[in-house]
Amino acid sequence: MRQPYYDSILLIERLHRHFLEVLKAELDRLGIQDINNVQSLILYNIGDDELTVGELTARGYYLGSNVSYNVKKMVENGYLGQERSPHDRRSVRVRLSMKGLELRIKISVMFERQLSSLENSGVSEEELSRTNDIMRKLERFWSGSIEYAGPSFAVSSVA
């Protein structure tokens, strides 16, 4: 069990990195240089919602990224609009601008192309569903490990 578990951890990390490379290649293909791959993934996941930076961070999609910095850059480059919450003036809500919506459509088209290619490569919907079920189990396991870290997760120090 040890090696398959470790292999899964490494594979998840590699898959995420490869997906970000695919996004970068698509942005390059479209000649878009004022947004990076991580920012475009954040933009895509905002979708039609209006969210705070805290809500984006809580979703946890953005490994190794500073969400506040990326949101600031997307606002500066016109992909996001922002406004202060009328209920809590400290809170700023962001939503896609027209430029952001246009990019989201282009990313959606890329996903549709990928979906067609994936279906032709022999990966079935059933296989993807089973894979997603397993990844959700890992997510629940790791979330539970954080919330309920007991003695088995403690690191002993050497004096």
Image (tube, grey):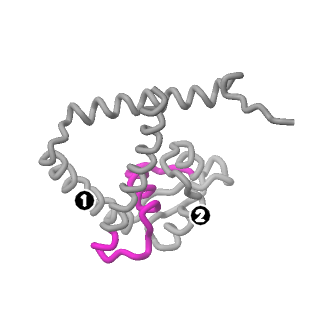
Q: Residue at x 46, y 60 (%)?
A: 38
Task: List x then y, in percent, for residue 62.
Answer: 50, 51
Q: Quadrant of residue 123?
A: top left
Q: Residue at x 33, y 65 (%)?
A: 103
The amino acid marked with disc number 2 is: Tyr
Quadrant location of the N terminus? top left
> Are dots 1 and 2 in contact, CB under 8 Å?
no
Left or right of 94? Residue 149 is right
Q: In this picture, which residue range is highlighted in magenta? A: 27-52
Determine the secondary structure under disc 2: helix
Task: List x then y, in percent, for residue 138.
Answer: 46, 30
Mark drawn on residue 110: 1
Q: Is residue 39 on the magenta stretch?
A: yes
Q: Residue at x 45, y 55 (%)?
A: 42
Examine the rendered structure and indicate whether residue 149 appears above or below residue 122: above
Q: Residue at x 15, y 47 (%)?
A: 121
Q: Nearer the viewer, residue 76 or 149?
A: 149
Q: Is residue 73 on the magenta stretch?
A: no
Mark pair 1, 2: CA separation: 26 Å
Q: Nearer the viewer, residue 147 or 122?
A: 122
Residue extending farthest to the right is 159
Name the residue tied to disc 2. 69
Examine the rendered structure and indicate whether residue 132 appears above or below residue 82: above
Q: Quadrant of residue 132?
A: top left
